[in-house]
Image (cartoon, grey):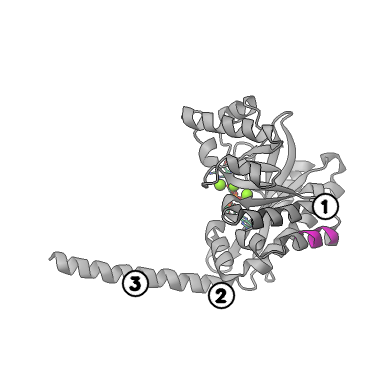
Amino acid sequence: QAKVAGKNCHRFYSRAMDQAVERRVHMEQDLRGAWERGELSLVYQPVYRMSDNRLAGAEALLRWQHPEHGPIAPSVFIDVAEQSGLIETIGPAVLRAACVDAMRWTDEHPGAGELFVSVNVSPRQLRNGDLSEQVAQALADTGLVPERLHVELTETAVIGDEIRASTLLGRLRNTGVKVWLDDFGTGFSGLSHLRRVPIDGVKIDRSFVADVLRDPDDLALTTAIIAMAHSLGITVVAEGVEKEGQYDILRERGCDLAQGYWLGHPMTMRDFMQLLG
Ligand code: C2E
Ligand code: MG
Ligand code: MG
Ligand code: MG
């Protein structure tokens, strides 16, 4: 009996695996040309300065509206884009589009101030070595001043070959843009890493932010990250702020910027323009 069940189970498992592989292959095919067909778009999540509670900028987040399957989660399709190499064409298009949109924010709402736009780039984009050229090109094409562009990289992108990563990050910063480390605290690099790689800011992962009110360890760690970052001249952003209490305690601990559902959900360019107006 057990043997039969085991056999069935095995068969089911391998079929499920085949399906997963097949889905991935299909997704890769569908993702090819998706930008040109207008299926990919950017939404913007507002980021606020905690010292005066004012809008400081926004993070650009990619969305894929699949013609048959509807919206696909970025955690799923970004991975496919990264593995397949499609990110090498999507990445520069995203950079450029975000710069174009940021130009429009201030052109149409001069009173909004020098809002930044923060763009996620994948480890592969950095490792390929021409990210700084792509960034410079996007700035030159659109006329956006470099100070208004932030590039977000995850810790995994800078782990490993630290010397090479530092060289690439240095080149990136020479274009004048700011470099932020995303999802900070989830990797293995730790605080000592901040000293060795040239970065401008860290984004504290939302898993820490989620527990700052409940778990004293998470609050202690977050407070330590803020203090350490500040001593090195590094800006701190809290992501995933969902409650007023989280905002208040992070503000009290000296966190510089915040984003999260409590402050604003990711929204279309049109809605973001409305927020400015
Ligand atoms: P991320 O860069 O850490 O982006 C923050 C994610 O948290 C976004 O998910 C955002 O919608 C979500 N979020 C924001 N506030 C809250 C909150 O208060 N609570 C909760 N639970 N979630 C919140 P999203 O849009 O699904 O993006 C997921 C990830 O996909 C991003 O994580 C980023 O790593 C990646 N990604 C998105 N757009 C791009 C892109 O253009 N290029 C690359 N390479 N990666 C991207
Ligand atoms: Mg990000
Ligand atoms: Mg993040
Ligand atoms: Mg995160």
- Quarter of the image for residue 80 reads bottom right
Which residue does the numbered mark 2 point to in the structure image? 29
Label 2, residues with CA under 10 Å away: few <14, some 14-19, many ≥20: few
* Front in this rendered view, residue 76 or 218: 218
| Residue 16 seen in render | yes
Q: Quadrant of the N terminus?
A: bottom left
Which residue does the numbered mark 3 point to in the structure image? 15
Residue ID at (68%, 56%): 42
Q: Specify which label sits upstream in the sequence, 3 or 2.
A: 3
Which residue does the numbered mark 1 point to in the structure image? 103
How far apart in space, not on screen, are marks 2 and 1 (Cα)?
A: 33 Å
| Numbered disc 1: secondary structure | helix
Residue 139 painted magenta: yes
| Numbered disc 2: secondary structure | helix
Q: Specify which label sits upstream in the sequence, 3 or 1.
A: 3
Q: Position of residue 188 (x, y in %)?
A: 51, 46
Q: Which residues are magenta?
A: 135-140
Residue ID at (66%, 28%): 254
- Give the dominant element type of the magenta stretch: helix, strand or loop: helix
Q: Position of residue 186 (x, y in %)?
A: 52, 45
How far apart in space, not on screen, are marks 3 and 2 (Cα)?
A: 21 Å
Residue 26 painted magenta: no
Q: Position of residue 199 (x, y in %)?
A: 69, 46
The amino acid at mark 2 is Gln
Total numbered badges shown on the rendered structure: 3
Label 1, residues with CA under 10 Å away: few <14, some 14-19, many ≥20: many
- With respect to residue 137, does 191 lie above or below? above
Specify the label residue 191 is tagged with.
Answer: none
- Residue farthest to the front, as pictured: 163
